[in-house]
């Protein structure tokens, strides 16, 4: 973003009903974060006697002719309220660099002339918020169209790019969101939440809302509260064990294992838990092949396997360093051996009467014996 303000302040100001332009085009990696602000404004408008009315449209369901016809319909203004139309482009697959071109070709090009005429003299008290999630580069037709409208009259159109915020911005945002809900959150707890959820603002907002309600009798949220209350608690087991496998100790891994089984998990949960261990070992095995045989950089492999971590964060650097050190602790032969052991363990978990906790504990003993011979 061009502004030096913290991202959510820029977004809140731009989307505040009193600051809206007749046309507002929002795009970028975190464009869907606009939903957070819009939800707050919708709630506020319900409490205002003459607050704005909100209407939502999805372009794969409703076309521009119908939307603009409704926006221009004078009968809409009988209530005397402003109208805010929130219009979503489809959510294309993450990382699809052609998404912007597809959106233009399929959903904007046929209505380009109609939209251009609409913004020559848009109706009063009607505001369009048009949201496209994904990166757009200068020269792409989707972005160019809205830039032409903005250049024609900046009083009628605003363009706002919402990029992935920096790590410290997200930590401040988490803290302030908790404060707005009457809670404090310890710095370590905020980092743990960010580590688990990644940079997805919608997911973070959802988890902040849930964690702020747990436990109700406490005024300060701890790291343990985050782990217990988070909707991704099952992911935590996977995450915590990955931490132990990667940079922790045998004692740490056995402690995570014991805590998991102390909860008397169902058979399906045990298999999911075991799968989280298997995925990490298989990732190491595949990474070893890619590094040794295909000469791929470890950083490239790590980024693909940890999409929730953003390069440039201190967390990204720490996890990359730990992953690299762990990978270097094993030979290809040793990793192949561990994968074969996993296959046998999988069969035992599904067909034998042996205690799952003991079976997995035995595997962890073998894993750390191999890993620590070099790391130690």
Image: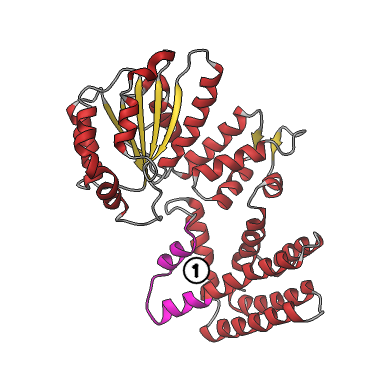
Q: Residue at x 61, y 43 (%)?
A: 207
Find out whether residue 292 is within the magenta segment. yes
351 to the left or right of 131: right
Q: Residue at x 67, y 53 (%)?
A: 233
265 to the left or right of 118: right
Find out whether residue 311 is within the magenta segment. no
Residue 350 higher or lower than 307, as above or below:
below
Q: Which residue is drawn at 50% across and 40% down?
A: 170
Rate crowding at label 1 as few (under 14), some (14 to 19) or many (20 or more) other CA atoms within 10 Å: some
Q: 13 and 316: which one is in front?
A: 13
Q: Name the residue under label 1.
A: 324
Residue 260, given in percent of the width and then of the height, sits at 75, 62
Residue 73, given in percent of the width and then of the height, sits at 33, 22
Q: Residue at x 61, y 85 (%)?
A: 340
Q: Which residue lies furthest to the front in this view?
A: 75
Residue 13 higher or lower than 263, as above or below:
above
Question: For the C terminus, which image quadrant?
Answer: bottom right
Element type at mark 1: helix
Q: Give the range drawn in magenta.
A: 285-307
């Amino acid at each position: 973003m061009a502004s030096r303000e913290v991202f959510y302040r820029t977004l809140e100001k731009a989307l505040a009903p009193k600051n809206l332009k007749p046309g507002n085009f929002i795009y970028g990696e975190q464009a869907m974060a606009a939903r957070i602000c819009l939800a707050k404004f919708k709630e506020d408008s319900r409490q205002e006697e003459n607050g704005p009315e909100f209407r939502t449209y999805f372009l794969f369901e409703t076309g521009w002719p119908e939307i603009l016809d409704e926006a221009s319909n004078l009968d809409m203004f009988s209530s005397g309220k402003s109208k805010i139309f929130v219009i979503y482009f489809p959510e294309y697959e993450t990382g699809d660099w052609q998404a912007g071109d597809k959106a233009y070709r399929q959903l904007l090009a046929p209505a380009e002339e109609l939209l251009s005429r609409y913004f020559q003299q848009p109706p009063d008290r009607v505001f369009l918020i048009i949201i496209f999630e994904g990166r757009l580069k200068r020269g792409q037709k989707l972005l160019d169209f809205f830039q032409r409208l903005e250049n024609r009259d900046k009083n009628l159109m605003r363009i706002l790019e919402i990029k992935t915020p920096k790590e410290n911005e997200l930590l401040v945002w988490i803290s302030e969101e908790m404060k707005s809900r009457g809670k404090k959150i310890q710095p370590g707890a905020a980092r743990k939440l960010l580590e688990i959820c990644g940079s997805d603002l919608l997911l973070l907002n959802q988890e902040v809302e849930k964690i702020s309600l747990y436990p109700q009798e406490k005024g300060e949220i701890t790291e343990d509260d985050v782990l217990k209350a988070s909707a991704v608690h099952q992911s935590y087991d996977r995450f915590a064990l990955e931490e132990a496998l990667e940079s922790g100790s045998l004692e740490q891994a056995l402690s995570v294992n014991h805590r998991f089984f102390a909860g008397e998990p169902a058979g399906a949960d045990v298999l999911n838990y075991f799968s989280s261990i298997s995925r990490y070992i298989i990732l190491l095995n595949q990474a070893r092949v890619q590094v040794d045989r295909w000469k791929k950089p470890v950083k490239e492999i790590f980024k693909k396997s940890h999409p929730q971590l953003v390069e440039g964060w201190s967390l990204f650097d720490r996890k990359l360093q730990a992953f690299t050190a762990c990978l270097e602790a094993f030979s290809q032969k040793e990793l192949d051996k561990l994968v074969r052991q996993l296959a046998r363990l999988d069969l035992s978990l599904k067909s034998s009467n042996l205690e799952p906790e003991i079976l997995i504990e035995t595997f962890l003993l073998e894993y750390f014996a191999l890993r620590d011979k070099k790391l130690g």
